[in-house]
Amino acid sequence: MITFNDVKNDTAIRTYIIKADESLRALGYTEHSFAHVTKVSETASYILEKLSYPEREIELTRIAAFLHDIGNLVNRCDHSQSGAVMAFRILDHLGMPADELAQVVSAIGNHDEGTGVAVNPISAALILADKSDVRRSRVRNTDMSTFDIHDRVNYSVENSELTINPENTEITLRLTINTSISSVMDYFEIFLGRMKMCRNAAKKLGLVFRLIINGQQLD
């Protein structure tokens, strides 16, 4: 069976992730390299582990999360679909069975808020993990005077935590935002679609999505 470690240590895959992130850097986007995909892998697997999904399904979630942004190598536009096609070729070449390959490719192809839908548990966990990765360390621009809204919002986040309650009924994203850098309204200007997507993804897993910013619950 293809493992997460097989994928994580594959030289070609690592090259694609590096080059995809270089393309996004040239376009002025926040970090989408190993820090991002590793965090998304960890968070997505935490979600399914907490909900007692089978270990193999959790492993496939780690793989999908690690590969989910490679489509940026082709173009930022429709990167989820191009990434799914790339992942299909890579994982098919490595010998992943068709039923597993279908789940991973569907998850990658549905992770973007423009067109994506939580079609299976793997895609739901990937969506929640990806859209909750907002943090200061993703900002590459060192000149605050030239920050765009994405830089401001990410830089303003001093703490971000995604957790599932002990009863496994709610998943909560808790953010601490420095409002002297970015307002809560700025956050919603760019993240409203993503938060709606998280709500639907949580529902796919039998959970209710909660968002708490600076101690205030926003439903």
Image (tube, rainbow, N blue to C red):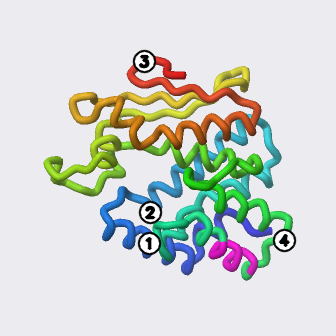
Give the Cα separation between the discs numbered 3 and 2. Answer: 30 Å
Which label's residue is closer to the chain start, 3 or 2? 2
Q: Amino acid at mark 4?
A: Pro
Q: Which residues are magenta?
A: 85-92
Q: State how far apart marks 3 and 1 are (Cα).
A: 36 Å
Residue shown at the point (54%, 66%) measured from the top left: 78
> Amino acid under label 1?
Ile
The amino acid at mark 3 is Gly
Could you tell me which residue is drawn at 38 percent across and 58 percent down?
A: 31
Residue of label 4: 97
Distance from Cα at disc 2 to Cα at disc 1:
6 Å
Q: CA distance from mark 4 to mark 1?
A: 27 Å
Residue hosting label 1: 18
| Local crowd size for mark 2, using a 10 Å CA cut-off: few (<14), some (14–19), many (≥20) | many
Q: Secondary structure at mark 2?
A: loop
Q: Where does residue 201 sit, x and y in percent of width and height? A: 67, 40
Q: Nearer the viewer, mark 3 or mark 2?
A: 3
Pointer 2 and pointer 4: residues touching (CB < 8 Å)? no
The disc, 3 or 4, on the residue closer to the chain's N-terminal end is 4
Give SS at disc 4.
loop
Q: Which residue is mark 2?
A: 33
Q: Residue furthest top?
A: 216
Mark 2–mark 4 distance (CA, rounded to whole Å): 27 Å
The structure residue drawn at horizontal position 75% and vertical position 50%, both measured from the top left corner, is 119
- Residue 217 image offset from top left, x and y in percent: 49, 19
Identify the main secondary structure in magenta.
helix
Of the numbered discs 2 and 1, the one sitting upstream in the chain is 1
Q: Which mark is residue 215?
A: 3
| Between discs 2 and 4, the one toward the N terminus | 2
Q: Choose mark 3 or mark 1, whichever is in front.
A: 3
Residue drawn at the location 44% of the way across and 35% of the way down: 160
Q: Which mark is residue 163?
A: none
